Amino acid sequence: MKRALVLTCVLVLGLGMFAYAADGLSGEWCTDITFDPQATTTAFVTDFESTLTVAYTIGSWVFTSVTGFDLTGWATQAFSAAGVLGAFTMSSDLTFNPADATFERWETSGSVSIAGVSFNGTFLLQGAAGGWHIPGVPSTDDWGSGWLFGMSGTAGSVGLAGTILFNLVYDADGVLQIVQTEDCCVCFSGIDLEIEMPFCCLEAVAIEINFTCEGGFDGICFDVTGIAIPAWPWLTFDATLCFDEGEDGKSLTIVPVLNLGEFDCVTLYYRINDADGGAGYTFDSVEFYGIELNCTFNGIAFRSASSFGDADDNEEITGNEDYWEVFCISYSGDGCCGGAYSFDVCTYFAANSAMLFDWGETVIDVSFGITSNFTITTGLTVDSTGFVEWTLGACVTF
């Protein structure tokens, strides 16, 4: 009952804004439904995604609501605001989990530039396990908050940047996450300092110094890219030298980089392999593990890509780890009434297929703009087992 009431309020608010401030409203509603023709009746619809985005612009500010639905129902709800407040550029994002009636994350950032120096700050409030529950809803979940303050600037040929974190760390994807040591405390997590400057014949040396709450000094690293070898203009090196505490307190990493120049329509995928057991740095071979051809004929784009390596290379080159080769044809143009259309066909080939020419799968995607703000999409996938997937979609902008 509560969920239905909340959803009703969201819709009524949106309609009210549309009625009284239509000039400031814009948005988009996109829906995709995926069918499995080979499945039973109960599993005929395998995926459903529908997203309603409503934005209200007033002055230099944009307020946005994003509502997402899937096969489980009301799946996501997010609100955001972005704009300029005096000399400050501000943004704020708030997300909820409708199914659990929980608050998930609130992140607010601001930045300002004064006399050539940029200052920025971020506040993050986040649930630790499934979201912080709204008042009145019982929960044993923990939650946390954190702060980030940073600055950056240049002085001649020297660039400086620094960030201090409280209750925050960056995960492997570079997203801020909470590290709450005590309830509601503002506790130091770390400092990151970055310096970039020329040194001797090196045009740019990047220096990174880190401090953490757990160990204090967390190391200093020097990065140099594009170290040239005069006799071999096609080969350069990137080097990273790091110092840290302890017996293994220094490490040097050398990465060779091939520079084979620009290709007109052919792209080669290559890497340099290290030799095991070599003294110093020994590179025993150059491996070419893929090739790609791109060209256009009268507006029709053709792409052919072949992987010579393993499944990991397939993913990089063809976009699908199951197939080592792909041929694609793409075309787009203007439709009627201000709309546009596009057509994409990709055929994949497997290494050990029993089909003719090692055929593995064909994927077709079509998009057709009925008007400038209404687009219909469809796609289908056929593989060695038959017609396996069909997707229908529509997108309306206003």
Image: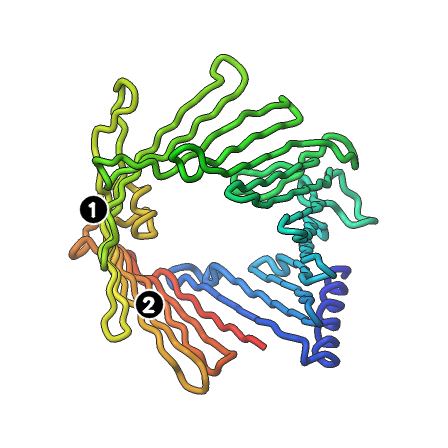
Q: Nearer the viewer, residue 57 or 98?
A: 57
Quadrant of the frame with the C terminus: bottom right
Along the line of sight, which residue is nearer the eye, 26 or 389? Answer: 26
- The amino acid at mark 2 is Asp
Residue sitting at the far right: 136
Q: Which mark is residue 352?
A: 1
Residue 345 visible to an observer of this rendering: yes
Query: How far from the left and from the top, in percent, is residue 280?
Result: 29, 20
Q: Amino acid at mark 1?
A: Asn
Q: How many marks?
A: 2
- The quadrant where residue 182 appears: top right
Front position in the image: 38 or 62: 62
Q: Secondary structure at mark 1?
A: loop
| 70 vs 126: above or below | below
Q: Nearer the viewer, mark 1 or mark 2?
A: 2
Residue behind mark 2 = 344
